[in-house]
Image (cartoon, grey):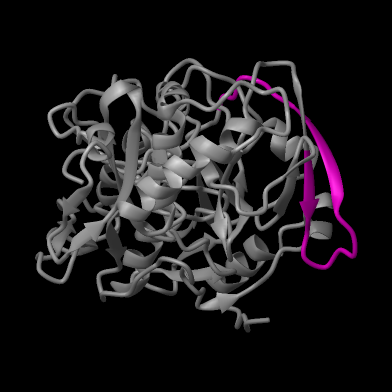
Amino acid sequence: MSDQQDNQVETNSDKLTPQKNNLLGIFLALVLAAGSFISGTQVDKLNISDTQAAGLFSFFNQPVVTSTETEADLSQFWRVWKLMDEKFVSASTSTAITSADKINGAIEGMVKAFDDPYTAFLPPVESAAFAEGIAGNFSGVGMEIGIRDDVITVIAPLAGTPAEKAGLLPGDIITQIDGTSTDGMRVDEAVRLIRGEKGTEVVLSIYREGNLEIKTYPVIRDTIDVPTIATEKKGDVFIIRLFSFNAISEMKTEEAMQEFTRSGTKKLILDLRGNPGGYLQSAVAISSFFLPAGKVVVKESYSETEMEKLYRTSGHTIHEFNKRDFVVLIDGGSASASEILAGALREHEVATLIGVDSFGKGSVQELLSLPEGASVKITVARWLTPNGISISHSGLKPDILVARTPENRIKLEDPQQEAAIRFLNGEEVVSQ
């Protein structure tokens, strides 16, 4: 998923260069093929740097490597290498493993030892697939996935996509993909299995909280076209639904806010439900429509020895709000840039959050290219709200808890939006 652009969940019409391309989103198991949309596995911060490529393949040519704290004894590694060469007998007729395969496996295991779901070593084939996803040159099912409680979880099916039409919901746990168990699977591995050619089918085995059994969902892959924004007015309440923080979200939100101003009402709902994130730059810019200049939107926290980086509003306030006339709707599909925007509006006391807990994704990844076409993606920072609260893992808790059940969705009922309208109309709304 920080200088230029962050968390792309969807759109990117620019080519990636060796310069920093900072993204803040989560892995998309997706989707967005051609056009301006970028999909696939998303990271919070991309920095594809040829100049910084580390010689990991030459790493294993030395018996000892020196770290900053101590010397790593690789004698046991080489002993196991030799024993495997001498004694291993394949139980199948598969092609014999090569030295490159063994090196890639060793690096992958070392990176996995850091126990971070968004840090991963990508061998050449996976790295190429990742780059293809960043370019948006493939089709998929139209949902974003992430790791929650060590399992592959649907963050949000995107509006109008095959995943949404198939009935997948935020919070669904993917237990199998075409019969392959997801136990211990990385997000990028799941993405690779889910996406594929337009018109082909992928079968997802889903566990949903409250159900007694796992159900299968056949989903037909397609090219995905996700809208950026939608507006409507219900009574004297204006509603803006923001689907992603992409390259045109700032412009579209400004247009929506001007439409809100012309509507003559002062009551606003900003619906961020199912919005998995996007460019950090968009989140900061959009916050400027609601907050005065100079307000902190998010803090970028690195190690204890590095200073936090602050992102502030630029002062393009279109309307002054308070907690009684502005509601932000969130749910388990609100992630990353959505959480940054919602957290900032709440902590600066201009909005009330209604819904359920957000997803909780606030880490920053840096992608570095390596020799032979491989790459490594490393978590390098965390995002904090203006008050210094980490949104990772636990996410944002709403001010007023209102759930929306699967049955509500099937019946096209929206108790969260209804609660927001009642709240804006002066009624007392109590958390469930």
* Residue 343 percent coordinates (x, y): 37, 66
Between 287 and 184, the one lying in front of the other is: 184
Q: How many marks?
A: 0
Q: Is residue 92 above or below residue 212?
A: above
In the picture, measured across the screen, residue 395 lies left or right of residue 194, that is: left
* Residue 256 percent coordinates (x, y): 41, 41
In the picture, measured across the screen, residue 310 lies left or right of residue 26, that is: left
Q: Is residue 331 above or below residue 55?
A: below
In which quadrant of the rendered view does residue 320 lie?
bottom left
In the picture, measured across the screen, residue 222 lies left or right of residue 362, that is: right
Give the quadrant of the C terminus. Answer: bottom right
In which quadrant of the rendered view does residue 123 lie?
top left
Residue lying at the far front in this picture: please name it.
86
Magenta stretch: includes residue 393: no
Identify which residue is drawn at 28% across, 39% down: 60
Between 104 and 138, the one lying in front of the other is: 104
Q: Which residues lie in the magenta part?
A: 204-225
Q: Is residue 230 shown to the viewer in this render?
A: no
Between 367 and 292, the one lying in front of the other is: 367
Identify which residue is drawn at 49% across, 44% down: 83
* Residue 366 percent coordinates (x, y): 27, 44
In the picture, measured across the screen, residue 174 lies left or right of residue 280, that is: right
Q: Is residue 120 above or below residue 37?
A: below
Give the quadrant of the N terminus. Answer: top left
Identify which residue is drawn at 82% across, 68% down: 210
Magenta stretch: includes residue 205: yes
* Residue 97 percent coordinates (x, y): 53, 27
Between 28 and 423, the one lying in front of the other is: 28
